[in-house]
Structure formats: structure tokens, C-alpha cells
Image: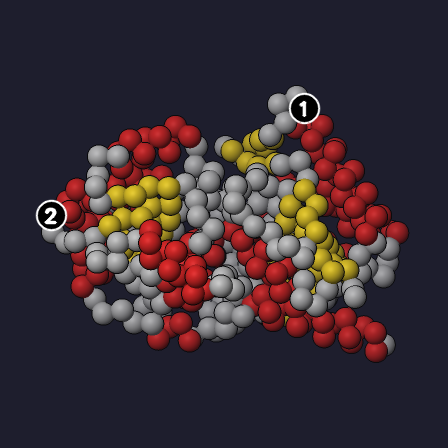
Amino acid sequence: MQKIMFYCQYLTGMGHLVRSTEIIRELAKKFQVYFISGGQPVADFKIPNNVELIKLPALWLEGGEFKIAEDSLEVEEVKQIRKDQLITSIDLVQPDCVITEFFPFGRHKLLFELLPLIQHIKANYPQTKIVSSVRDFIGRQNLHEEKDIICDLVNQYFDLILSHSDPNFQSFAETFPNYREINCEIKPTGFVAQSFPENSIKSYYQLLDELDTNQPTILVSVGGGRLGYELLDAVIESSSMLESQIPHQFQIFTGPFMPKPLFKQLQKAASTRKNVKLQRYTNRLLEYMQNADLSISLTGYNTTMNILKTGVRAIVVPIGHYSKDHEQLMRTKKLKTLGIVEVINLNDLQPNYLAQRIISCLDKESDTNFTHLFNLDGARNTADILEKFWSQLNNY
């Protein structure tokens, strides 16, 4: 059985972690998988049991600067430890394939460890294939400045690019206009959507115990939580206006990475509202969305996949690092054009206006036809593509 090492680093949110975990879940059915995770830990987040976890000392970004969990160390020391650990892991496992999530199309702040890693692989294990795993939109504003570096890295070190999008929604050529300068094969996989729990009946009844099914449920989520406070604050303010107009309950998830002071402010505001339930995190967001009457969220990759998979009515507020990352804005524009979501711009995020849009959206008939527009089996397709890729190599 071939050995695959999958490198995943999430610096701001947890979208890269969620998507990568869904992929390795499918890879582990065909390969021996080692998952390298370098982000801030998320309590209750589960890595598949049949995957070996290699945990790097955590690094993440706040205000554009690296943060670490180890109080006794400096950032530069953690960087060196991580770089050494990656090289050691390669030497111990000697994988047949290494997948780098989003690199080299992003993660250039991690060149201190990723460049030595791929150089070590090429120098010492030339038979090991290096693959890049890329979301639907690269979305970085400075992409034009780094396109030459990206192409050079791909052409020098990479054997395959996996584009986790449905070409009917967004092609790789659209997100990376210089694709013709890339020499290796580019394979679209379809979207990577989360899977429902294996024991879905038991999980369903557990969820019903937590929800008041006699009232419409409005699910509100903001991914990891470092972004999106403005949305949650507006939702809680609007709840007082909605309480007398429509029966409903808000189920809000702030995300595990929302700063404690902001979480406490939301917690205090929610404590006075009978129609608001506020929690940090759930590993069952897809199930909540399946049972919700309306979803209000940002437009990160995984939340969008949940909307597509469940067919829930959705209001989205694209909030991102607009100065550097236009991913959510670009994705939202396409979703709106297709009539899949209702959109509220950040500048219009006022409680009165939000309350009106919520009522309007709940009054509309739910249309789940768009759930069949796109291929959502990207995780399984990724495993199949790599299996076929390996088979073709062995036939040469």
C-alpha cells in the first residue's frame, strides 16, 4: 500500500483543516495516510482513526504576525523545530507521495519550512511524487506579483495539481490565469463537501433533542471565528426585533478561534435573549445546517459546500481579508448570480435591515434544485485520481 503524507497548515480560520480532513478520510480507504497538521488545536475536532497524525508545534497568524502556543519559546525557535520535524518525518516514513495543501499557490509565509521540505524530498527521495491540493478560488490580491514564483516552484518540484472545484462553477484557469506556464498535469476533482456521520439516524435524533423543532431554526456561523464578529453582533441585536414578529430560535456558533474578549461580549448580549443560543464550536455543523430553516454565514469554502449539500436557504455576508484575499467576495458573486444565496454586504449589516432580510428569506419557498448542479464528491474523486495516477506510473 502506497504511503501518502498530507501537509495542512491553517493560519487564520479552520477551512483548510476541514477540507483536508475530508480528503484524507477518503485517501485512507486506499492508501496509508500520515496527516501533518500545523495549526492551532481545535477541541473536539476529529481526525480519522485510520490516519496517523503528525502534529507540528502550532503556528497561526494574528494581525499578520505569527503566534505560538509555547510560552517558553520564541517564534524563530518554533520555526526551526517545525522544519527539523518535517525533515525527520520524511526520513522516517519515506512516503510515496507528499501532498501540500494550498502550497505553492499560497502559504508563502511558510517557505521557511516548505522549501527545505520539498528540496529534501527531491534530493533524497526522487521517486516520491509531490502534489498540490488547491481550493476553488486562490483569491489573493497579490497573485500577479507572485505568479512567476508559483510557476517556478510548480515546474521544479510538483508532479500534479488537484483543483478542488467543479469546473461548471470555477475552473483552475479562471483562478490562475498563468496556468499555461505550468508543466505538470492539473486535475479537477469536484468540490470537497463534508460527509454526514456514519450513524446518521442516531446523530439525527440527538440533534433533535437539542433543537426546538416547533420553531424555525436560524443557524448562524462564522467558520473559525477570527473573522465575522460584526455579523454575530448584528444577529443578536436583530433578535429582539424578530422575537415579536416571527417565532424562531437562533443557534449561533462563534468558532473556536474567536478572541475571548469578543466571545464574552457576544455571550453577555445573548444571555438576555431567550431566542438565542450561543456556543463556540460544533463538529456537527453540517447536520445543524441540514435541519435549519435558514443559514446565515460567511462564504468560506466549507460553509459554501454545506449550503450546496443541504440546499438550505442562505443569507451570506462575505467577510475576508479584503486587502489581501478576495476569495469570499469572488465566491459570493458567483453564488449570487446562480441564485443560490441572498447577499448582505458588510456595509449594510445593520440590525433593522438584517431583520427585514431574515423575514423575507424565511417567507420564500426553499429551492434545493441547486444541490444537483455540482459534483460534491471531490474527496472521493481525489482518492480515485491518485490511485489512477499511481497505476499509470507503475505501467511505465
x then y, percent, for residue 73: 67, 24
Q: Is residue 82 left or right of 137 when viewed as pictured?
A: right
Residue topped by disc 1 = 73
Q: Is residue 202 left or right of 183 when viewed as pictured?
A: left
Classify mark 1: helix, strand or loop: loop
Are the residues at dot 1 and dot 2 in contact (C-beta closer than 8 Å)? no
Classify mark 2: helix, strand or loop: loop
* Image quarter of the N terminus: bottom right
Please identify, in this view, whether the residue under mark 1 or under mark 2 is nearer the observer: 2
x then y, percent, for residue 70: 63, 27
Figure check: 396 above or below 361: below
Residue sitting at x 46%, y 73%: 374
Q: Is residue 297 left or right of 283 when viewed as pictured?
A: left
Figure check: 16 above or below 313: above
Residue sitting at x 57%, y 59%: 22
Foreground residue, 291 or 178? Answer: 291
The single residue placed furthest to the bottom in the displayed view is 395
Res. 86 image quadrant: top right
The CA span between labels 1 and 2 is 53 Å
Question: Does residue 100 appear in this view?
Answer: no
Q: Is residue 47 left or right of 366 when viewed as pictured?
A: right
